[in-house]
Image: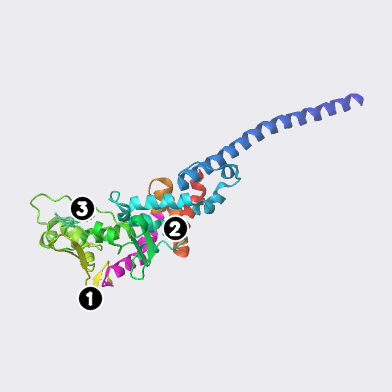
Amino acid sequence: MMRGRTMLVAAVIAVAAAMAAGGRTAGAAGDGDVQAFRERCATRLSISLLGKGANEALLASADPQSGVDALLESGDFVERFARFANAEFNRDPGKNSAEDASYHLAKHVVKNGKPWSDLFLGPYKVDATGENGAVQVTEDAAGLGYFRSQPWLLRYAGNELAGLKIATAYRILNNVVGLQLMATTNAPDADVSATGRQAGSCTGCHFQNWYALDHVASVLSKKVTNDKGEVSFKPYEGGAKDLLGGKSIADDKQVVQALVESENFSFQACRLSFKYLYGRPENQCEGPVLDRCITAFKATKTIQSAMAVIAKDPGFCQ
Ligand code: HEC
């Protein structure tokens, strides 16, 4: 009896010890893994959104992805994203700050939680009108995002022989819906006039596709250069044309409106967000996240809403 009890007690102690040892080992490894995962996630979010390491609070957070909305409101995000968008929208940096109108207006739009479409359609002017020529964003009822701001207009007026602003048309298409074309290098003897552009390999980009650059450019203002070499812009007054796959369009504003209303617009906002967060466009297996991004963006309209879907997806921290 005595002996049996002793053995029983001994057995119970052995089991408890085994459990304690096993439990402690497994528990330590598990907590460590979870902790490391959270810290990696916090760091990844902070680096991608703000361009700097995570702060203590985010590193200690049990769910770093729940902090995404706060990160999207920080000045660091606004600044970094405006720079990124500007770099995406231009082939090279502007000669001066006013030429980088998309940087200044993107900053204004994101900082104030405005719809992303305000960047292209909003009533603004971006010009070096501040103190000591500082670049300012001001309200302007005649504005069209940054597309009617003088420094930007001059930057992208192009050099087409008749003043047709093909370069402007392409830049608008590129910035609003992400159209990417490689302007083919002309052979020295190529006919670059409208006749030349209608021929051979030129006509696809310039006259035939839905984005037909010459057609879109034809409803923009014309570039006029006087004998002193000064450039001004003459409004188009020829009436509506059938452009961009069947839309009736009579000016630059209607071009931008048609693009913003197209499915490509939300797609491009989400692609831009993927590029910002991952340093590359979305890939095929990210289709479901892309779809949710587009749905959220259509409903909320801010670039932050697009960004949040991607950064909060479990896949972002894996
Ligand atoms: C793959 C599409 C594509 C093809 C093909 C193409 N172009 Fe272009 N072209 C463009 C784009 C894009 C621009 C605007 C470039 C920019 O941003 O300044 C452009 C601009 C131009 C301009 C205006 C340049 C300026 O400074 O305003 C001329 C002229 C021109 N192309 C002539 C031609 C001729 C001639 C051909 C055929 C030999 C041709 N292009 C073929 C895409 C194309």
Relative to 203, say whether 318 is above or below.
above
Residue at mark 2 to residue at mark 3: CA–CA distance: 31 Å
User: Disc 1 or 2, which lies upstream in sequence?
Assistant: 2
The amino acid marked with disc number 2 is Val
Q: In the picture, which quadrant includes the N terminus?
A: top right
Q: Tag 3 or tag 1, which sits nearer the N-term?
A: 3
Q: Position of residue 303 (x, y in %)?
A: 44, 58
Instruction: Tell which tag, 2 or 3, sits nearer the viewer.
Output: 2
Return the residue found at the far top.
Answer: 3
Disc 1, ligand 1: is the CB inside 8 Å?
no
| Residue 264 shown in magenta | yes
For disc 2, the neighbor class at 10 Å (few under 14, some 14 to 19, many from 20) is many
Q: Which residue is mark 2?
A: 110
Given the image, on which type of amino acid does mark 3 rest?
Ala
* Relative depth, front residue between 234 and 161: 234
Q: Is residue 304 left or right of residue 143?
A: right
What's the magenta region? 248-271
At which x and y percent is residue 15? 76, 30
